[in-house]
Amino acid sequence: MRILHVITTLDPRDGGPPVVAERLAAAQASLGHRVGILSYADPAPDAVERVRKSTANVPGFDRVEQFGIHPDAGMLGGFRAPNLRAWLAVNLHDYDYLHLHGVWNPILPHVASAARYLNTPYAVVPHGMLDPWCLTGQGFAKATKKRVALSLIYKRMLNGASFIHVLNADEGRLMSPLALSPPTVTLPNGVFESEVSPLPPQGSFRATHPELGLDPYILFLSRLHFKKGLDYLADAFATVLRTHPTARLVIAGPDDGMIAPLTEQLKSLGNAFSRTHFVGSLYGQDKLAAFVDCSVFTLPSRQEGFSMAITEALSCRRPVVISDQCHFPEVAEARAGYVVPVGAAPTAEALAAALSLSASDAAAMGERGRELIMSRFTWPRIAERTLDAYAKHPRKR
């Protein structure tokens, strides 16, 4: 089968969708299919290096064809897209099925329109971008802009899909008020076992960050964005320090508007700021080393699709504390961590409980998390399920 994935960028600074697209494409290619990824090109050396580090250990990624389209200049370049249209005219007929990642970018409706013209089936994976919080929870101006764009441009793209790929059952349910016509198919994210086997030796991250000493640390690893609940985490950490005064907080990830307000908040919370460490973005083995050495991973988000960071933390045998808006109830069901309501108080209580675990109990919780991921959330298994979905949902006239 000839499959083309389409996404705005492959840069992992953009969050989970590029990481997912790269790995799903690689898993499909490893099953013997011809797979490509079409995205906008970013020739900046630091962007190229981030992509290289993020995909260095992805099995099968060397078999994936990469097509980088130069963005068209000007305010309306993305909507007119002559470079993209030229590529589609020459190449799109070579593919049997398209997989579109995301919602809010002109590259996607352009490709969807061309696919409909050629009667080529496609799936759309919104990556949580149609969650009610994403549509309404970021202020009136953004909500209005998205509502208008959805009505004028993106709903036609979505309704033309053969199916909507949702990452969890909650996502499909929460999208129901949009009254989209395609069926939904639930296909989660996962990991490659070879990416997390073997893991970096214990102590590797501490060796590169000696300021941590041997103190237990809580790890947050994601984009530093308001929706990730960092304001809740700051208040929760200050509360945790009352009972666990040696704890530290490590915050890893690219800034997306939260470093300045988060710094001010932490400075107002006693010694919370002095025990917080901003380490920037981590990729590849550096990221895994941070997971391996932490006492607990946390993601107190207001909204998530299906966090790659949670699956990676679990595969690194770490207890996790996540909000119920991460839509990962399997964590609690497997007793691999704590799933709590959004907010500072429940997050603080769960973090304190995780830090109070004995070494044997923490290890047992970590093993249950690893088993959960390896038994249910691996890319080869997920790739096979996507191929089944393609077969069950052919072109939509």
Image (cartoon, helix red, strand yellow):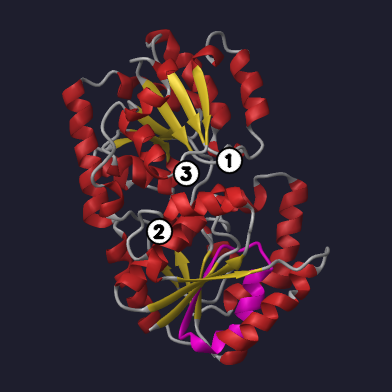
Residue where numbered disc 1 is placed: 227
Asked if residue 27 is positioned above or below residue 163 in the image, the reply reads above
Q: Secondary structure at mark 1?
A: helix
Q: Mark 3 or mark 2, which has the lower sequence index?
A: 2
Q: Between residues 342 and 210, which one lies in front from this camera angle?
A: 210
Q: Estimate how packed mark 2 is, as few (under 14), some (14 to 19) or many (20 or more) residues with alpha carbons within 10 Å.
A: some
Asked if residue 5 is positioned above or below residue 15 in the image, the reply reads below
Q: Nearer the viewer, mark 3 or mark 1?
A: 1
Q: Mark 1 or mark 2, which has the lower sequence index?
A: 2
Q: Secondary structure at mark 2?
A: helix
Q: Which residues are magenta?
A: 92-115
Q: Which mark is residue 169?
A: 2
Asked if residue 83 is positioned above or below residue 264 in the image, the reply reads below
Instruction: Answer left or right for 233 relative to 201.
Output: right
Give the residue type that dot 3 points to: Gln
Q: Is residue 60 magenta?
A: no
| Residue 123 in view of the camera | yes
Give the residue type that dot 2 points to: Ala
Image coords of residue 76 (percent x, y): 82, 68
Q: Mark 3 or mark 1, which has the lower sequence index?
A: 1
| Residue 156 in view of the camera | no
Residue that appears at 47% across and 74% down: 36
Residue that appears at 44% across and 12% down: 241
Q: Secondary structure at mark 3?
A: helix
Q: Estimate how packed mark 1 is, as few (under 14), some (14 to 19) or many (20 or more) residues with alpha carbons within 10 Å.
A: some
Q: CA distance from mark 1 to mark 2?
A: 20 Å
Residue that appears at 54% across and 40% down: 302
Q: Between residues 75 and 186, which one lies in front from this camera angle?
A: 75
Quick check: marks 3 and 2 in contact, CB under 8 Å? no
Q: Which mark is residue 325?
A: 3
Q: Quadrant of the N terminus?
A: bottom left
Q: Is residue 99 magenta?
A: yes
